[in-house]
Image (tube, rainbow, N blue to C red):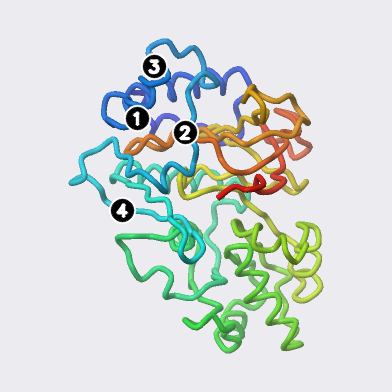
Amino acid sequence: MIDYEEILVIPPYSLDKNTKEQLLSETLRQLTIAHYNKCVEYKRMLDAIGFNPEKIKGYYDIPFLPVSLFKELELLSVDKSAVFKIMTSSGTTGQAVSKIFLDKTTSSNQQKTLVKIVSNFTNSARLPMLIIDSPSVIKNRSMFSARGAGILGFSIFGTDKTYALDDDMTIDFAAIESFLDRHQGQKIMLFGFTYMVWHHFYKELLKAELRIDLSKGILIHGGGWKKLIAEAVSPDQFKQCLEDVCGLSDIHDYYGMVEQTGSIYMECEYGHLHASIFSDIITRRHLDFSPCDINETGIIQVVSMLPESYPGHSLLTEDEGVILGEDDCPCGRKGKYFIVLGRLQNAR
């Protein structure tokens, strides 16, 4: 196997198309063979379609699993005794949730990768951190929800970590004011899931008519856009509303999922989501799953080097998106950049 520590020293947005494709193709080929040999269910699926992992030429050739499969099957490429942590998706009440089994190596690589990606946007300095959630969400350390995993993953970037919400999800104005008093004039980081930031933070600030100054803050948020569709809240409106109520203008969305934790896609200052060297996005046509062209709407497939303990390295999501370009974003970061349009109709 390629030594992942050697890949981690490469700046996350530094490889051009050809170099990145070579690296991803070889790493994902090795991962596919490993999962084929170690996960009985994965081997059966590949055998059923007559696929031979030894004949992979590039990562576009690797079969994808529908992301919903992790709600139905427990897929592992390690012995259960090696499972260090179980992650679950944030399904609505009564829905089945994905269960992702991590060994220590996969969990460690996820965190190291997250640090490399996010540091490119925040610089490496740790910042005082206001978490737009309640502390109860991370209480069960052996089984993490997507929210809990996100909070713990991003906490590595924070000092003086303070929760903005009580356990009953009401806003804790006293805690927020105390936090801001302690860090007056300093740059701070805010982190939360998109719908939590909107419903439990922005709306409560608006209702309380309380003006707080977060003009020195950087907000990283992700997940939960589908819960805002009914309110027709666009990304631009989301940003403008937060700036209006608390002066917050440095706002970065990210795209990611519990099935590929760590290899997230961060939004740059031009509003584009970016694929780092550790992962990639492919958009596929609805009719035959052939790859889309640039600027063509398709179903999002994501590939990642990270999943070693489970066969989650090539997944077809339930989202639609458009790849806008590659290696030529005005922000200067190399790799594909894209937008997510939303969930596929009738996706579970």
Q: Could you tell whether 106 is left or right of 174 in the image?
A: left
Q: Earlier in the sequence, mark 3 or mark 2?
A: 3
- Tell me which residue sits at (60%, 56%) in the image: 222
- Tell me which residue sits at (50%, 35%) in the image: 315
State how far apart marks 4 and 3 are (Cα): 28 Å
The residue pinned by badge 4 equals 85
The amino acid marked with disc number 3 is: Pro
Give the vertical position of 79 relative to 4 (above or below). below
Give the vertical position of 145 relative to 203 (above or below). above
Q: Residue furthest front?
A: 346
Q: Earlier in the sequence, mark 1 or mark 4?
A: 1
State how far apart marks 3 and 1 are (Cα): 11 Å
State how far apart marks 3 and 2 are (Cα): 14 Å
Question: Which of pointers 3 and 2 indicates the residue nearer the eye?
Answer: 2
Q: Quadrant of residue 180?
A: bottom right
Q: Could you tell whether 142 is left or right of 189 in the image?
A: left
- The tag on residue 42 is 1
SS for dot 3: helix
The spot of residue 39 in percent (x, y) is 29, 31
Q: Could you tell whether 232 is left or right of 146 in the image?
A: right
Q: Earlier in the sequence, mark 4 or mark 3?
A: 3
